Amino acid sequence: MTVRAVLERAVHAIERWQVLDAPGYQVEHGLSLTFLLAGRRARQLQDVLHGVWFGHPLHPALVTLPVGAWSAALLLDGLDATGRGGPGTGRAARTVVKLGVGGAVASAATGLTDWQHAHDEGRRVGLVHGALNSTALALYTWSLADRARGHAARARASAAAGYAITLTSAYLGGVLSYRYRLGTDHADRRNEPRRFTPVLDESDLVEGRPVAVDADGVPLVLVAGDAGVQAVGGICPHQGAPLGEGWLHQGELVCPWHGSRFSLDSGEPAQGPATAPLPCYETRTRDGRVEVRRRARWRTPTAVTTVEEASR
Amino acid sequence: MKADDVLTAHHDVLRGLLRDLAGTTDAQADRREELREEFLRQIEIHAQIEDEIFYPAVPDVSPLLSLAHAEHRQIDDQVATVLRTPVDHPQFVAEVRMLEATVRHHTMEEEQRMFPQSHALGDARLEELGRQLQDRQRELARSGGMRLLIRLKRATLRLTRA
């Protein structure tokens, strides 16, 4: 059996493990309560942790800290154990283990915040990922305490066990990103339509009510309001929710699934969990029909901008 | 009564309370407090009977459970915002309307998508679930634990208003 087949089988086992759903929702309720205690700032706090200010999730960036620090610790422990490290190696190992523990706590905070909104299989794999990481964190914390007490050999053993668990869990983290696409941008960013394309009769628009339309296969949302007719992408960048089923709150478009809010002027997320902006479109009205065209990001709206288009 | 009919009837109660609440004027502070209180009570009961009885019964016939959970969470967060907003605040009605839109979307999704999917369970099972839902609903409406939970939640939200 290939390595891939073995790993695949393990991941499939977790995906189908529906008994994880009940504890998963319990954990989420606990998180929800914790955030309630943070008061009105709970929303901002979650947005910081999601990475709304950053443009993509913060979690994958932060996890490099524990993984990197603990890799260094493994090397230093190895040198120390075989007597090739020279003086100060043990102390250096202790410092990087400590750095990793700090990074792991920050990673856990961001990871839990993102995980709250995962669905089905991704949610189950995420729960196992979190449980493994917590185990690794506990082992490294124990290892740190042992280092202070002078139990050098036991400290190295628990750190090595923690490292093995961390790598296993990192694989699951990869599954969450690359298979379930948690944290990736789900918006439809095709460079279409390049020319103004009629999508709807102006008389079909109701002020302040989002309408889903299709522009040459690109799903969009139109909103009529004080700023005229505005058009943004119809797929939420967070997890692909149909934004045409959303509504307006304080002039922002609200995602019906997880409550992200988007500015209609810039497409920027005013509130997470979405971290990426919505694509925006130009609109005009001709003969009572609303027409849309992609907003030019490079030279002109009709310019050929991708390899794919150039090869057509 | 079948499960989906029981839940739809309760949805009507929830939507009605929010419609009434959004229709109040700034002068009706007491009425606002009263309706907000009643909505909080009903939504807690509703979420609990769905979580305990209906949702665990449908995973094999509906793929929408995760969405339903996500929407409950969104409703929960917006309920918290409404509870933290003083009834005489200029944003009060806007926040209630936001809650109304959230609840409308969630209930319509259930009524138009999930409930028809649940019919695959068969009438007998739906009747049985309906009975369980009604019994639990009545039980929770009388329960001291539920009253305590709501009081605790309200107090916590007020304390953390800043």
Image: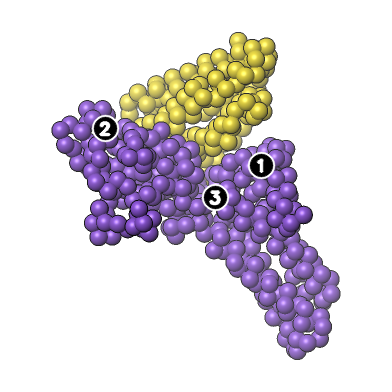
Residue A65 location (% of width, % of height): 60, 68
Residue A154 location (% of width, % of height): 84, 71
Query: Which badge, 1 or 2, comes first in the chain's sequence?
Result: 1
Task: Tell me where residue A32 sits by quadrant.
Answer: top right
Q: Amino acid at mark 2?
A: Leu
Q: Secondary structure at mark 3?
A: loop
Question: Quick check: marks 3 and 2 in contact, CB under 8 Å?
Answer: no
Q: Amino acid at mark 3?
A: Arg
Chain identity for the colour yellow used in the image? B
Residue at figure coordinates x 58%, y 31% from the top left: B63
Q: Residue furthest bottom?
A: A86
Mark 3 chain: A
Residue identifier under label 1: A24
Task: Tell me where residue B94 sits by quadrant.
Answer: top left
Chain A hue? purple
Residue at figure coordinates x 65%, y 67% from the top left: A67
Query: Label 3: how many residues lie within 10 Å, few (<14), some (14-19) or many (20+)?
Result: some
Q: Nearer the viewer, residue A3 or A135?
A: A3
Q: Amino acid at mark 1?
A: Gly
Query: Which badge, 3 or 2, comes first in the chain's sequence?
Result: 3
Mark 1 chain: A
Residue identifier under label 2: A200
Residue B83 relative to residue A59: left or right:
left
Distance (Cα) linking label 3 and label 2: 32 Å
Distance (Cα) linking label 1 and label 3: 19 Å
Residue identifier under label 3: A181
